[in-house]
Amino acid sequence: MKETLCKWLLRLFGWSIGPVSENVPKCVICIAPHTSNLDFILGQLYYTAIGRKAHFLMKKEWFVFPLNLIFKKMGGFPVDRKKNNSVTDQMVKLFEKYKYLHLAITPEGTRKKVDEWKKGFYYIALKAQVPIQLAYIDYRKKEMGFKGTFYPTNNPEEDMLTIRSYYQEMKGRYRNK
């Protein structure tokens, strides 16, 4: 029922579902480009439409009543950026804890234009020994989908160049990254 409703909503707004990745038990989902808060809503609709649930990281400040109940139900994990603790290590522990975990992360780390992507998603996948699924939101085509599955090689510089190359033609809502 939820899948049908989400597919209908996407079609209603003119969006199409592009290629779907294999459904692995655990993965980090790299989602790009990220230029708008609307990306979150579209991403949730897409992932529900294909019958999956993705978890996501969000500033702990957003996890106040009653929003905390909503965000936790949606799959949110609160992150305290002020404390000096490793988010990577926290996420690796979650991967160890759960049998099924898809963790969606935007590598830009913000909706603003950035020249360098943050590598946290890469290090989480590397340390947790899970693949990175390369998801996209292309506003030019009004399509969401996956470009493939990437397995980190422990060569961050080369791997990040390869991962970014998958997104060269993607158009964000406000500007191309």
Image (cartoon, grey):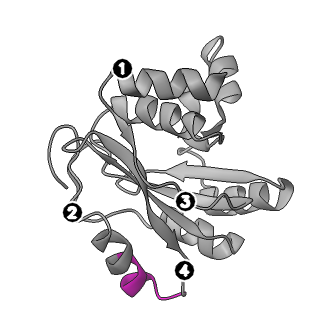
- Which residue bears the numbered disc 4? 152
Which label sits on residue 115? 2
The crowd level at tag 2 (other Cα within 10 Å; few <14, some 14-19, many 20+) is few
Q: In this view, does 142 lie to the left or right of 44?
A: left
Is tag 2's residue or tag 1's residue first in the polypeptide sequence?
1
Give the CA separation, mark 3 to mark 4: 17 Å
Is tag 2's residue or tag 4's residue first in the polypeptide sequence?
2
Mark 4 or 1, closer to the camera: 1
Q: What residue type is labelled 3?
A: Ser
Residue 28 lies within the magenta run: no
Q: Say if 122 sits above or below 58 in the image.
A: below
Q: Are discs 2 and 1 less than 8 Å apart at CB? A: no
Q: Where is residue 153 in the image (x, y as percent from the top left)?
A: 54, 87
- Which of the pair 108/153 is nearer the observer? 153
The crowd level at tag 4 (other Cα within 10 Å; few <14, some 14-19, many 20+) is many
Q: Position of residue 46 (x, y in %)?
A: 49, 37
Q: Can residue 63 be seen in this view?
A: no
> What residue is shown at x 65% (from left), y 21% (from top)?
68
- Which residue bears the numbered disc 3? 21
Is tag 1's residue or tag 3's residue first in the polypeptide sequence?
1
Q: Can residue 21 be seen in this view?
A: yes
Q: Position of residue 88 (x, y in %)?
A: 62, 62
> What residue is shown at x 45% (from left), y 55% (from top)?
19
Q: SS at mark 2?
A: loop
Give the CA separation, mark 2 to mark 1: 34 Å
> What residue is shown at x 44% (from left), y 67% (from top)?
119
Is tag 4's residue or tag 1's residue first in the polypeptide sequence?
1
Which label sits on residue 3? none
Q: What segment carries the magenta color?
A: 154-160
Q: SS at mark 4?
A: loop
